Image: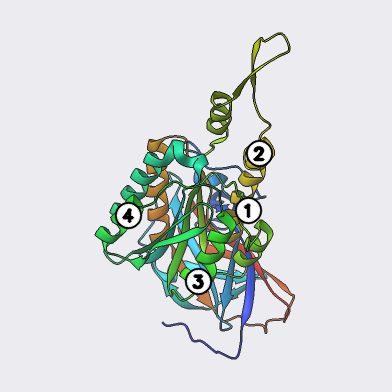
């Protein structure tokens, strides 16, 4: 069944997308979403999905409420054979009739953002190799737009499924100076993906440190994300130790009054301080959490490859459920959501509610 769009009505639904675990021992022969407290811990190569909390915001042009639902077994194997009849949706405790159901394995469009600032020169080969591998894992109908950024963002190719074009774009990314991360995200949200329909996501490879943006800020980007149906997947490189070592290696040799040499290490500049990296980490976690995506900490080529594979699989293997609420939407009101699946011992990842923004 197709979604029915009513152009005169526009709701912004802000919803908490949290990991929920089946409690089959308490609710009988089915699995049900149960909210858990927020946890901002990053996913590493040994971190399970059941430690991720997420938040998702969707702009809806109708009173149809849509819910993305990801379902796995206890062993974290995605379930792809669920039928609409096995799902139930509850809003504020009242069961809702499912009017829209879309199964898994749908094509998507990804904006691949590559941090080409000097701080990532130490990881350039790994970044490009992993990006190429990610593209090779996509299906024929998946599209990618490649954007690099240093002191300014550069669109290296428009959304395409042409693998040769994508390969040239990724290999053509060059190291520069400065980091305009926020401006690059602003360009991606407001221009590159604004007109794209269907499933879409942003995959960002960066240390998250911004030193050069003049058009946008971290606060403005977070605000934009709350209003967009976009998943963000930051893959965070921690380049702090590399940058600090480079500063030491390039330290100036000076001489004291007795003509004895000593090493003078200049104070860290903006983008080199420990607090800059702490704020960058928090920012990447925030945009992932508020969009419904996940943050990956990558420390090796193997870890990065695994993260890319996980993102590609997750984007495709998601159910979409929709319903027309039995009660009229009230601007500013909050609504709780619960999803039930009539199979036991499942892990259900969905959002646990939303609010209708005031006009």
The mark closer to the camera, 4 or 3, is 3
The CA span between labels 4 and 2 is: 35 Å
Whichever of labels 1 and 4 marks the residue nearer the N terminus, that label is: 4
Q: Which residue is mark 1?
A: 286
Q: Which mark is residue 269?
A: 2
Residue 5's place in the image compared with 71, above or below, is below
Q: Which residue is mark 3?
A: 191
The mark closer to the camera, 1 or 2, is 2
User: Would you call the spot at circle 2 few (<14 residues within 10 Å), some (14-19), or many (20 or more)?
Assistant: few
Residue 216 pos. (x, y %): 63, 62
Left or right for 141, reference 288? left
Residue 182's place in the image compared with 76, above or below, is below
The CA span between labels 1 and 2 is: 25 Å
Q: Quadrant of the N terminus?
A: bottom left
Q: Quadrant of the C terminus?
A: bottom right
The mark closer to the camera, 1 or 3, is 3
Q: In which quadrant of the rendered view does residue 27 lie?
A: bottom right
Residue 228 pos. (x, y %): 57, 69
């Amino acid at each position: 069944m197709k979604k029915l769009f009513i152009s005169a009505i526009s709701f912004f639904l802000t919803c908490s997308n949290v990991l929920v675990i089946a409690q089959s021992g308490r609710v009988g022969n089915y699995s049900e979403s149960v909210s858990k407290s927020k946890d901002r811990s990053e996913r590493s190569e040994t971190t399970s999905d059941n430690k991720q909390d997420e938040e998702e915001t969707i702009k809806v042009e109708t009173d149809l409420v849509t819910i993305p639902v990801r379902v796995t077994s206890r062993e974290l194997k995605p379930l792809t054979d669920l039928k609409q009849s096995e799902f139930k949706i509850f809003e504020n405790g009242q069961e809702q009739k499912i009017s829209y159901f879309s199964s898994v394995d749908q094509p998507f469009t990804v904006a691949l953002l590559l941090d080409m600032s000097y701080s990532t020169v130490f990881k350039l080969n790994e970044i490009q190799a992993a990006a190429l591998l990610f593209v090779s894992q996509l299906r024929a109908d998946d599209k990618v737009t490649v954007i690099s950024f240093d002191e300014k963002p550069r669109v290296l190719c428009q959304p395409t499924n042409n693998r040769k074009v994508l390969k040239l774009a990724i290999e053509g990314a060059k190291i520069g100076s400065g980091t305009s991360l926020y401006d690059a995200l602003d360009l991606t949200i407001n221009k590159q993906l604004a007109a794209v329909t269907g499933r879409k996501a942003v995959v960002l490879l960066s240390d998250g440190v911004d030193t050069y943006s003049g058009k946008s800020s971290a606060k403005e980007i977070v605000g934009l994300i709350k209003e967009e149906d976009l998943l963000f997947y930051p893959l965070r490189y921690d380049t702090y130790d590399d940058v600090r070592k480079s500063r030491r290696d390039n330290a100036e040799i000076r001489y004291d009054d007795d003509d004895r040499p000593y090493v003078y290490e200049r104070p860290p500049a903006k983008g080199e301080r420990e607090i800059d990296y702490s704020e960058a980490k928090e920012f990447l976690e925030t945009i992932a959490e508020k969009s419904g995506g996940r943050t990956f900490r990558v420390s090796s080529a193997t870890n990065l490859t695994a993260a890319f594979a996980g993102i590609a699989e997750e984007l495709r293997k998601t159910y979409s459920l929709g319903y027309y609420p039995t009660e009229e939407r009230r601007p500013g009101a909050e609504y709780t959501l619960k999803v039930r699946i009539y199979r036991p011992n499942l892990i259900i990842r969905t959002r646990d509610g939303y609010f209708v923004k005031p006009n």
